[in-house]
Structures are given as structure tokens and as C-alpha cells.
Image (cartoon, rainbow, N blue to C red):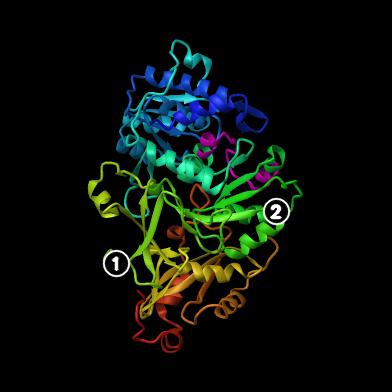
């Protein structure tokens, strides 16, 4: 099957219903299909053949879904790209993916054109509404999707590249179709009357699958927001009577921090992913906006949804829920064996959404997928009912004096403080303990910053070896394109590093808080 078959079906069933919204502009499903078929004809006119790759660089405007589905209709694989990438980064994506052409919205065309010129890839610059009549003049629209098999590649989604160069996750038509169906049915319980907020970037797997593809699979309407702004988001929820909101925790915190009085009573279900949702934020959001937040988990390599707190079932705030239909999850130890009951282990995932592999990287693929199980690199625990709780990324694990410290639980304690808007916990090199605990904190508007008070507050809530000895204030924490906090980009102030290195509190921390022979947790 071709993933674009879903658009053909939606146009047949819901042709006059609104598919896409951008402010006051609307596009019906019949118009969406017509414009995507025209875009497919433009793609083919460039000499691009089925199976070739098309790069797409666009914010959340109608051009994105039109070109995305147009390329799929033409039998191509799409390489979605963040418009904020540098020229050098874009050039790497073009070259590594083997893109035969690039479609870019005019607002971001300058950098794209420069990168394409350096790599020899032809560029088609379109407006926010998609290809113009002049661009389509002389091309022949397709009349039906080019047949593809379920195992053919539909997209190449590049990972964030926390180690080395980004890797392209190869997602098949079956991967994306099954995950879109799961998102629409098992999580959203979608109907054609639902309106889903499209503020998650469509070039990211969360927004692409749970927003765009789930909407097309179920006939929902997608309200596009090119750049997330909490005030604008709430206004659009009221204007378009949005029933489904999907976001990352920082988006929920930002909306919670507004003082507007928009009528958001239409909200029914909210999905959260990308990073751990602080329970205090979840509780406060649900109380203020009268809706339910379902927290879950997934990765680019799993299309993305692997587990979720699911509607109609028991919900456990602070967990990422249970494995969704079509997916299986388990915890493994460092040797790849199932973890012992109650022990922390690495999440391994198997099922319909697991990628075909990393583009051009067979060794990385073999390392990541063993016997069909994708090794996520995320550490978790699982309870007797199958609910998983993320502990942290392996690479974010802090080992202080032999004890494992997982940033998330320290961050949860920080978020409970009424002055804290955002917090991220990182390790700081220490000569005797190996690493010391540090925390970067952004405070709420009008709140004061008192590191001693924060330190004492957290010390009451976590084990003595876990509380942050070093706390510093930041205006905002660094975030990726979806709003996920980037721990790897958080650097402790030099004065903090000096303090840790000089070991001014070594006697206290080593003797009282951390036994010299403290074991490392499994």
C-alpha cells in the first residue's frame, strides 16, 4: 500500500469537510487531494522516479502536507527537514539522503537554495499554499497514487544526532500507516468531527504521525500553527473549537503560564510526549482547562508511538503508559537479557512501527536492532501492570560517588517549587565524586531566585546524594525544534565548575552523603 491511499480514501468519504486550517483559510479534503495530485505531477516533471528521495523544508503551512502527500502519491520517499537547520546541516541531509530534489517554502528559501547550490540538488521554491499555478503550468497531475509495497520507504527522518552525525531512520509505508491508525483510534478515539491542533512541527515524527497522518487517516481537521506561541495557541483552540491538542511538556507549561480567558472548553484530549511531563504541570493544566492529558513515549525509529496512557483505561500520571496495539516493550540489561523484576533497564521495542534501519549505516542498524528489538537507549522501570516509567537517557545518567542519579526525579522535585518555570539537571565533573549534581533553573515571571532555598527544598524531597549542590539561573533552557529541553547544550557557569573542581564540599558530600564503596545500581 501507499500511505497516500489514506488521503484518497479521506477525499472520497469526507470530500467537503475541512482538512486543513491556517487562520481564516481552509482546504477541504477534496481540495487537498486535488492539490497533492498536482504537486505529484510537478514532482514527476523534475525527472524524479518512484523510490527517489524528495527533501521538504517548510514550517507548518498548507504547503507542507500538500507537498508531503504529493511526493508520496508520486511514489517518492520524503526527507522532512527543520527550516532552522544551518546551510552546512542542510547540505549533509541532502547528500546523505541522496535527495533528487528539494521543495522549500519561500520564507526559508535563502538557506535552502545556498545549501542546494553547494550540493547540486535542484530546488523548487513554493509559497505557503503550495505550488503556484505558474509552477504547475505544463505539468500533468497524477490521477492515482503510484503503487508501493508496505515495506517501501515512505520517509527518512533524521535523528537529533546526540552522538556523531545525525542518522536517517528509514520508515516504511506500513510503519507510518499502522502508527497513524494507532494514534487515531487507540489514543485519540478520533471522529471526523474532531479538530486537532497542528503546532508540533510536521518535520518531526510526533507532529507528522499523530497530527497530520492521523488526521488524514480518520478525516479529522488539522489546525496549523507555523510557530508555537502559547497565547496564539489558546486563541486558535477557541477559534477553531480544537478538540485534540498534542504537544511536549514545555508547551503545556507555557500555556499554563498565560493569563488569557479564551474559551477552550472544546478541548477533550491532550497527548504529551517528547520528554517527561512533570506531574505538577499535568495536574495544573488539567484542572485549569478541564481536559485529560495522556502521556506516552516513542522515538523517530518507532514511527513514533510505542506506549501511552490510553483512554478508557487506568491512567498513571508520571508514567508513559503501556505498549500500544501492534507494539511490544520490555526492559533489558547491559547484556541484552530481560531485566530482573523491579530493576532499571533499557527499553527495547518491537512491532509494526519499528524502522527498517538507518539509511546507509548497516553497522548502526545492527547495533540498534537485535532480533527485531530496537534498543532505545532510554532507561525505565515497569510495574506489575505493564506501566513503564522513564528514569532517563543512558547518556544523561549522572554517577555521583558510585551512586546513579537520574535527572528526572531531581527535576520533578524542582518543578514542585512554586517559583520554578523550567528546570534541567546535569552532571558537573568532580575530582573525587566523579560528577556533582547541578541544576539550571528558569523562574516564573515575577518570582525571585534563591538558590539556597531551592537547594533546601529539593534536599527535603530526594536522597541526600541526589540534591543539586549547584543551582544557577537561566532566562530559558535550550530546546530543540519540538520544544524538548536539550540537556546536552546546558553548560554550568565557570564559577560553578571551579567550585566543583576545587572540591570545597568534598568532606561533607563524600563522607556524609555518599559512602566510598557505594554500589552502582543495575
Q: Quadrant of the C terminus?
A: bottom left
**Looking at this view, is 98 or 519 the one in front?**
519
The CA distance from mark 2 to mark 1 is 42 Å
* Residue depicted at x 25% and y 45%: 361
Task: Please tell me whether mark 1 sits on a helix, a strand or a loop.
Answer: loop
Residue drawn where x is 38% and y is 44% of the image: 158
Placement of 364 over or under 194, stated as above or below: below
Left or right of 12? Residue 505 is: left
Q: Earlier in the sequence, mark 2 or mark 1?
A: 2
Give the residue at mark 2.
289
Q: Position of residue 333 (x, y in %)?
A: 31, 67
Which residue was labeled with disc 1? Answer: 334
Q: Is residue 215 magenta?
A: yes
Which of the 4 image quarters holds residue 473? bottom right
Report the residue that reaches farthest toward the left: 363
Task: Give coordinates of residue 290: x percent, y percent.
Answer: 70, 54
The quarter of the picture where the N terminus appears is: top left
Give percent across and percent down for residue 335.
26, 66
Magenta residue span: 214-235
Label 1: few (<14), some (14–19) or many (≥20) C-alpha neighbours in 10 Å: few
- Which disc, if any, is residue 177? none
Mark 2 nearby-residue class (10 Å; few <14, some 14–19, many ≥20):
some
Amino acid at each position: 500500500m501507499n500511505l497516500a491511499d489514506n488521503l484518497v480514501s479521506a477525499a472520497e468519504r469526507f470530500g467537503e469537510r475541512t482538512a486543513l486550517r491556517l487562520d481564516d483559510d481552509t482546504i477541504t479534503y477534496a481540495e487537498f487531494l486535488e492539490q497533492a495530485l498536482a504537486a505529484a505531477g510537478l514532482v514527476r516533471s523534475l525527472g524524479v522516479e518512484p523510490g527517489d528521495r524528495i527533501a521538504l523544508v517548510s514550517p507548518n503551512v498548507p504547503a507542507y502536507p500538500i507537498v508531503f502527500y504529493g511526493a508520496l502519491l508520486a511514489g517518492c520517499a520524503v526527507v522532512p527537514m527543520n527550516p532552522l537547520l544551518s546551510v552546512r546541516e542542510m547540505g549533509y541531509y541532502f547528500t546523505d539522503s541522496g535527495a533528487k530534489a528539494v521543495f522549500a517554502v519561500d520564507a526559508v528559501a535563502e538557506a535552502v537554495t545556498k545549501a542546494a547550490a553547494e550540493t547540486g540538488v535542484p530546488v523548487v521554491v513554493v509559497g505557503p499554499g503550495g505550488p503556484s499555478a505558474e509552477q504547475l503550468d505544463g505539468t500533468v497531475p497524477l490521477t492515482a497514487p503510484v503503487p508501493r509495497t508496505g515495506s517501501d520507504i515512505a520517509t527518512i527522518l533524521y535523528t537529533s544526532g546526540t552522538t556523531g552525525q545525525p542518522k536517517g531512520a528509514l520508515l516504511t509505508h506500513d510503519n507510518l500507516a499502522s502508527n497513524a491508525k494507532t494514534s487515531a483510534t487507540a489514543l485519540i478515539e478520533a471522529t471526523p468531527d474532531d479538530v486537532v491542533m497542528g503546532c508540533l512541527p510536521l518535520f518531526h515524527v510526533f507532529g507528522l504521525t499523530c497530527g497530520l497522518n492521523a488526521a488524514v487517516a480518520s478525516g479529522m481537521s488539522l489546525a496549523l500553527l507555523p510557530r508555537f506561541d502559547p497565547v496564539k495557541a489558546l486563541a486558535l483552540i477557541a477559534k477553531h473549537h480544537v478538540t485534540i491538542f498534542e504537544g511536549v511538556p514545555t508547551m503545556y507549561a507555557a500555556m499554563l503560564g498565560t493569563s488569557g480567558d479564551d474559551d477552550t472548553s472544546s478541548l477533550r484530549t491532550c497527548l504529551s510526549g517528547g520528554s517527561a511531563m512533570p506531574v505538577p504541570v499535568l495536574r495544573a493544566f488539567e484542572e485549569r482547562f478541564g481536559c485529560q492529558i495522556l502521556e506516552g513515549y516513542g522515538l523517530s525509529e518507532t514511527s513514533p508511538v510505542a506506549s501511552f496512557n490510553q483512554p478508557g483505561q487506568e491512567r498513571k500520571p508520571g508514567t508513559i503508559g503501556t505498549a500500544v496495539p501492534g507494539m511490544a516493550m520490555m526492559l533489558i540489561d547491559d547484556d541484552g537479557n530481560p531485566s530482573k523484576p523491579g530493576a532499571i533497564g533499557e527499553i527495547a521495542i518491537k512491532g509494526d512501527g519499528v524502522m527498517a534501519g538507518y539509511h546507509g549505516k548497516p553497522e548502526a542498524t545492527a547495533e540498534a536492532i537485535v532480533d527485531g528489538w530496537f534498543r532505545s537507549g532510554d532507561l525505565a522501570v515497569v510495574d506489575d501492570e505493564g506501566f513503564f516509567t522513564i528514569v532517563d537517557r543512558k547518556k544523561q545518567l549522572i554517577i555521583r560517588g558510585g551512586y546513579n542519579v537520574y535527572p528526572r526525579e531531581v527535576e520533578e522535585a524542582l518543578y514542585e517549587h512554586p517559583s520554578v518555570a523550567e528546570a534541567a539537571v546535569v552532571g558537573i565533573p568532580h575530582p573525587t565524586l566523579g560528577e556533582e549534581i547541578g541544576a539550571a533553573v528558569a523562574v516564573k515571571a515575577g518570582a525571585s531566585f534563591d538558590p539556597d532555598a531551592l537547594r533546601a527544598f529539593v534536599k527535603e524531597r530526594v536522597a541526600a546524594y541526589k540534591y543539586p549542590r549547584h543551582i544557577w539561573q537561566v532566562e530559558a533552557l535550550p530546546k530543540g525544534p519540538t520544544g524538548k529541553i536539550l540537556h546536552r547544550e546546558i553548560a554550568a557557569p565557570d564559577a560553578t565548575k571551579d567550585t566543583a573542581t576545587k572540591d570545597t564540599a568534598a568532606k561533607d558530600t563524600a563522607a556524609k552523603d555518599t559512602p566510598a564503596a557505594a554500589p552502582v545500581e543495575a
